[in-house]
Image: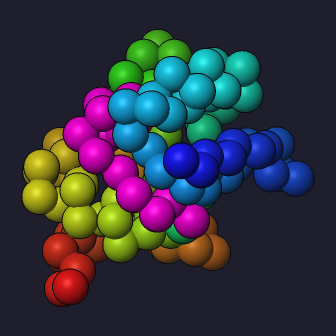
Amino acid sequence: MAFEMSRDGDGRTIRVAGELDIATREQLETGFAQYASKDEEVRMDLSEVTFIDSSGLRSLVALTRHLNGVNQIVLVDPSPHVIRLLSLTGVDDVGIFRIEDGDGSRSMGPLTVPQE
């Protein structure tokens, strides 16, 4: 199991790498609570997530509670693994997260499931 979380130089981006699953769920939630601020939008760079299961997705959804409905979590450049799970579960359609490409310049359109 590999999991890493760090805060980017802009002070708002949390980089997550490795596996998001039941084994790392608590680490993600604890780290997010430590890094996140209720006063600002939180960006999560998920480009290096190599695996995510329903426990990891549940954690991402649960993290929105830390923001008290004031701000949104922006998923930046989610890996194909993340895109696949968001699309298959329909979470990408309910507006919980904003999803941006890697440079943050635009929101991504509807997600399509990557072909394996």
Q: Is residue 12 left or right of residue 60?
A: right
What residue is shown at x 46% (from left), y 63% (from top)?
50
Where does the image place residue 59, in percent across and percent down from the top left? 39, 29
- Asked if residue 80 is positioned above or below residue 10 in the image, the reply reads below
Where does the image place residue 113, in percent across and percent down from the top left? 17, 74
Q: Quadrant of residue 109?
A: bottom left
Q: Is residue 44 among the parts visible in the rendering?
A: no
Q: Is residue 110 left or right of residue 18?
A: left
What residue is shown at x 80% (from left), y 51% (from top)?
8
Q: Is residue 113 left or right of residue 35?
A: left
Write the start and end of the magenta stretch as one range: 48-60
- For this orientation, the residue located farthest to the front is 1
What residue is shown at x 72% (from left), y 28% (from top)?
35
- For this orientation, the residue located farthest to the bottom is 115
Of residues 109 and 52, the one nearer the viewer is 52
Structure colour scheme:
rainbow
- Asked if residue 73 is positioned above or below residue 58 in the image, the reply reads below
Q: Is residue 12 magenta?
A: no
Of residues 44 and 38, the one nearer the viewer is 44
- For this orientation, the residue located farthest to the right is 9
Where does the image place residue 51, in percent across and percent down from the top left? 39, 57
Q: Is residue 50 among the parts visible in the rendering?
A: yes
Q: Is residue 81 left or right of residue 106?
A: left
Q: Quadrant of the C terminus?
A: bottom left
What residue is shown at x 17% (from left), y 60% (from top)?
87
Of residues 43 and 60, the one nearer the viewer is 60
Q: Is residue 58 magenta?
A: yes
- Asked if residue 88 is positioned above or below residue 20 in the image, the reply reads below
Where does the image place residue 10, in percent across and percent down from the top left? 83, 51
